[in-house]
Image: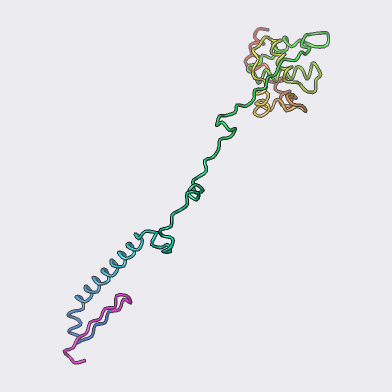
Amino acid sequence: MTSSEARFTINVREGVVELEGKESFVDKHLEKFEEIFKMAVKEAITRGLEQNIALKAQPVQAALPQELQHQEIPIAAEQQMAPVQPQPKGGNGKHTPRPTVTIHPIPVDLKANESKVGLREFYAEKKPANHYEKAAVFVYYLTKFNKQQEVRFGEILSCYEEVNEKKPSIVDIVKNSIRYKGWLEQGSEKYTARLTISGENFVKFDLPAQGEKVAQATLS
């Protein structure tokens, strides 16, 4: 290459720039060639992105075999592809209510005699404030005074009648007392309950409530 010759080569794909010539020529035009190189790289990148976007925008049908592009889907296949609607439980879509359990009072001896105090007197002494306390008092009475190992729910309802109190849903009261209070526990048969140690201590030592005990002491 003679002194007057100069050569400039750009390979965008490989990122190679070749510049040959005199040192003064190279120094003078290096910055211009760098700018040209940057523009060429940017143009190549832009062209590549445009090609990728064009390829992605092509319909999916073009990727299918030619013999399948114009084939229609049978109606039966379309029906098979339709989503299956879930059927409601019960067949009619209506909510089936939980059956209601009816408990009837069962006769039990609650009157006073020579060997025990009557339920009315014992209830007046303990003064239970809510249905959980009342149920605990009734089961305590039937366990300690009537000597029953287990108490049927119907017998608890008879206790409500004896003291002339409004009867609750006894199944829910006993169930919640077992679960949250711990004063009763499930008996060996359905709709029966037993007094726990915690329930016995509550009725024996904690009733009546502290305020009631103070009032009774003041009156006496």
Which quadrant of the rendered structure holds the C terminus?
top right
Q: Is residue 127 above or below residue 37?
A: above
Front residue of 91 and 112: 91
Q: Which residue is at a point 63% across and 16% down the rendered structure image?
A: 129
Residue 52 rendering spot, x and y as whole percentages: 34, 64
Which quadrant of the rendered structure holds the N terminus?
bottom left
Q: Is residue 206 left or right of residue 93?
A: right
Front residue of 61 and 145: 61
Front residue of 199 and 169: 169
Q: Which residue is at a point 76% across and 11% down the rendered structure image?
A: 110
Q: Is residue 10 magenta?
A: yes
Residue 171 rendering spot, x and y as whole percentages: 67, 23
Front residue of 61 and 94: 61
Q: Is residue 187 left or right of residue 49?
A: right
Q: Is residue 25 above or below residue 47?
A: below
Q: Is residue 135 left or right of residue 63?
A: right
Q: Which residue is at a point 18% across and 79% down the rendered structure image?
A: 29
> Quarter-wise, where is residue 154 in the image?
top right
What colouring style does the render use? rainbow
> Quarter-wise, where is residue 68 in the image?
bottom left
Residue 126 rendering spot, x and y as whole percentages: 69, 14
Magenta stretch, overall SS: loop
- Residue extending furthest bottom? 2
Residue 141 rendering spot, x and y as whole percentages: 75, 17
Q: Is residue 4 left or right of residue 193?
A: left
Q: Which residues are magenta?
A: 1-16
Q: Is residue 43 magenta?
A: no
Q: Which residue is at a point 64% across and 28% down the rendered structure image?
A: 180
